[in-house]
């Protein structure tokens, strides 16, 4: 429980820092996709219930930090989460390069879902062009960033999860 709360707090802080730092440097059309990487991390965790509740808790901060119209980004994030749940049982427990690769593929799928959403809602929208223009750089950045970020989130969660045979948290 405490490990899940730590992941949520870290996720919100990372998403806010990403937006603030990129805006400070004048970068508006590209991001590191930290919110989606956190969704991927949740999708490939072992516990479904706690991951699903964390995803629900991250929906509003995820929408606030993406800056797009409400609902579209979250819809894609939920679909990506559920798709990653299908492969999570086939992957090893610890965060690895395989999970980072699936995370990059999930970012690509998410961009395709967002583009499909906008094609249905507003086919003439310039957002579609923007989504396709950022699809490849977002996938590459997710591949590079997801390996250390996933490892760090797993380490953080392990630090706040009681070990078997102990009465409380044991750091070390």
Image (cartoon, rainbow, N blue to C red):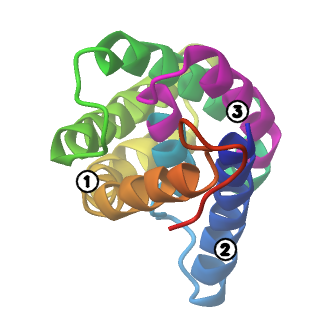
Q: Nearer the viewer, residue 15 or 117?
A: 15
Quadrant where the N terminus is found in the figure: top right
Magenta extent: 41-62
How far across and how far down the image is residue 9, in percent? Answer: 74, 56
Q: Is residue 126 magenta?
A: no
Residue 98 in view of the camera: yes
Q: Quadrant of residue 51?
A: top right
Q: Report the side of 113 relative to 122 (left or right).
A: left
Classify mark 1: helix, strand or loop: helix
Q: Quadrant of residue 94?
A: top left
Q: Are marks 3 and 2 in contact (CB under 8 Å)?
A: no
Whether 40 is drawn above or below 9: the answer is above
Q: Nearer the viewer, residue 77 or 111?
A: 77
How far across and how far down the image is residue 127, in percent? Answer: 55, 43
Q: Nearer the viewer, residue 156 or 139?
A: 156
Specify the label residue 17 is tagged with.
Answer: 2
Q: Which residue is mark 3?
A: 54
Q: CA distance from mark 1 to mark 3?
A: 22 Å
Q: CA distance from mark 1 to mark 2?
A: 19 Å
Q: Which residue is mark 1?
A: 143
Q: Nearer the viewer, mark 3 or mark 2?
A: 3
Most prominent secondary structure in the magenta stretch? helix
The residue at the point 66 percent across, 69 percent down is: 19
């Amino acid at each position: 429980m405490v490990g899940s709360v730590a992941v949520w707090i870290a996720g919100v802080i990372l998403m806010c820092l990403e937006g603030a730092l990129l805006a400070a440097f004048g970068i508006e059309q590209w991001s590191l996709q930290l919110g989606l990487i956190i969704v991927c991390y949740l999708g490939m965790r072992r516990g479904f219930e706690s991951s699903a509740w964390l995803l629900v808790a991250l929906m509003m901060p995820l929408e606030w930090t993406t800056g797009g119209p409400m609902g579209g980004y979250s819809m894609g994030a939920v679909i990506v989460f559920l798709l990653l749940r299908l492969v999570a049982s086939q992957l090893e427990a610890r965060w690895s390069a395989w999970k980072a690769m699936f995370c990059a593929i999930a970012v690509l799928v998410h961009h395709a879902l967002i583009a499909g959403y906008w094609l249905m809602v507003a086919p003439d929208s310039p957002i579609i062009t923007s989504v396709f223009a950022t699809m490849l750089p977002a996938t590459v950045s997710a591949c590079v960033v997801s390996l250390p970020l996933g490892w760090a989130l797993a380490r953080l969660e392990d630090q706040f999860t009681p070990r078997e045979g102990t009465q409380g948290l044991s750091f070390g």
